[in-house]
Image (cartoon, rainbow, N blue to C red):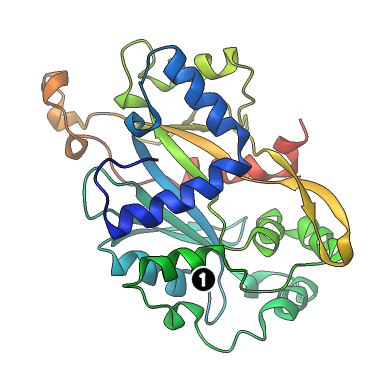
């Protein structure tokens, strides 16, 4: 996610991506293979469909807090999504410019967890008395970048992490990783022929030895058939917990998306097709399965 034209927003996005790719080896492996096979000539040519964040849905945190940063920089709040079994709410946000990624922000409905898990989460966040984003000068790029890198609560204990893991793998991921970038997404339909369908690109990835999330199948397809998604499983990272305890846990991952041309534009020549002619937004069923890229049933395979 390198941008040729620099702006305050692209500087923030690039900073997020720099930290993310250092912890996700698949990013460099996939990018190198795409360059070696002449799909792109550099990282900057890869179109990023969207990036995603996970948050805790409690007062002073969650969606209403986190979204302020991106709304300030021109993003528009779009559709709402509900994931009942995972106890999650989410929205997506459209970018101010076509060449920027969409943003998908989800939050855990903490009040729907067991009392034990609510107490554990509360022990880390109850000392946050004010919305931390309100203390950030959103016009100061360096301050915004610093906010993303600053832990908002103490490092959890391994014991607390494991208790949360049993009830909500999403909760355990957030309590350790905080506002860390969860994934970025390669826009497959923008690639050269032979690689510009998700079926073809998945084969390319599998031939590289990349492990893909197979929850619900390798391809996650929207009900209208116009949005196809897949993802790697999360890389396992050695995490250091409170009191210097260590354990391997799920980190972040890479997603891939193919957005089909809308039926009303089916007669357009390929050279004339723009992003506005393609399926936009997200799909609850797809996203529900993509979430599991960090879940134990995938990561431990």
Identify the image quadrant of the C terminus. top right
- For image coordinates 39% across by 15% down, the residue present is 195
| Residue plotted at (31% across, 12% down) | 193
**Left or right of 217, for residue 98:** left
Please state if 9 lies on the left or on the right of 215 as rendered. Answer: left
Query: Which percent across, then down, holds residue 23?
Result: 62, 43
Depicted 195 relative to depicted 228: above or below: above
Viewer-nearest residue: 150 or 97: 150
In percent of the image, x 37 and y 72: which residue is there? 68
Q: Quadrant of residue 88?
A: bottom right
Q: At 53% across and 87% down in the image, what residue appears? A: 130
**Is residue 288 something one can see in this rendering?**
no
Query: In front here: 36 or 297?
Result: 36
Whether residue 55 is visible to the viewer of this picture, yes or no, is yes
Question: Relative to 180, is 256 above or below?
Answer: above
Where does residue 265 sit, x and y in percent of width and height? Answer: 13, 29
Residue 78: percent from left, percent from top? 30, 59
Q: Quadrant of the N terminus?
A: top left
Disc 1: which residue: 62
Residue 111, percent from left and from top: 64, 75
Q: Quadrant of residue 133?
A: bottom left
Left or right of 111 in this view: 255: left
For label 1, the SS is loop
From this viewpoint, which residue is outermost toward the bottom?
129
Q: Is 149 above or below relative to 221?
A: below
């Amino acid at each position: 996610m390198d941008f040729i034209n620099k702006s305050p927003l692209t500087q923030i996005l690039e900073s997020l991506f720099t930290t993310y790719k250092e912890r996700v080896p698949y990013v460099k492996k996939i990018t190198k293979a795409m360059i070696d096979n002449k799909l792109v000539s550099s990282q900057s040519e890869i179109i990023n469909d969207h990036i995603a964040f996970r948050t805790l849905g409690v007062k002073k945190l969650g969606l209403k807090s986190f979204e302020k940063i991106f709304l300030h920089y021109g993003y528009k709040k779009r559709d709402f999504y509900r994931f009942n079994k995972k106890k999650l709410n989410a929205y997506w946000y459209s970018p101010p410019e076509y060449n920027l990624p969409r943003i998908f922000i989800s939050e855990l409905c903490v009040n729907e967890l067991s009392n034990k898990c609510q107490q554990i989460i509360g022990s880390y966040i109850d000392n946050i008395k004010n919305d931390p984003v309100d203390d950030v000068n959103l016009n100061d790029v360096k301050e915004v970048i610093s906010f993303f890198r600053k832990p908002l609560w103490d490092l959890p204990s391994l014991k607390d992490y494991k208790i949360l893991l049993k009830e909500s793998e999403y909760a355990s991921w957030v309590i350790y990783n905080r506002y860390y970038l969860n994934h970025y997404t390669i826009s497959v339909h923008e690639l050269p022929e032979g690689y510009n369908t998700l079926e073809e690109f998945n084969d390319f990835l599998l031939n590289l030895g990349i492990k893909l999330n197979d929850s619900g199948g390798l391809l996650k397809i929207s009900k209208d058939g116009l949005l196809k998604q897949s993802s790697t499983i999360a890389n396992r990272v050695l995490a250091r917990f409170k009191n210097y305890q260590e354990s391997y846990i799920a980190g972040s991952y890479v997603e891939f998306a193919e957005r089909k041309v809308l039926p009303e534009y089916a007669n357009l020549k390929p050279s004339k097709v723009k992003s506005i002619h393609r399926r936009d937004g997200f799909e609850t069923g797809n996203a529900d399965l993509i979430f599991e890229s960090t879940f134990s049933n995938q990561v431990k395979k």
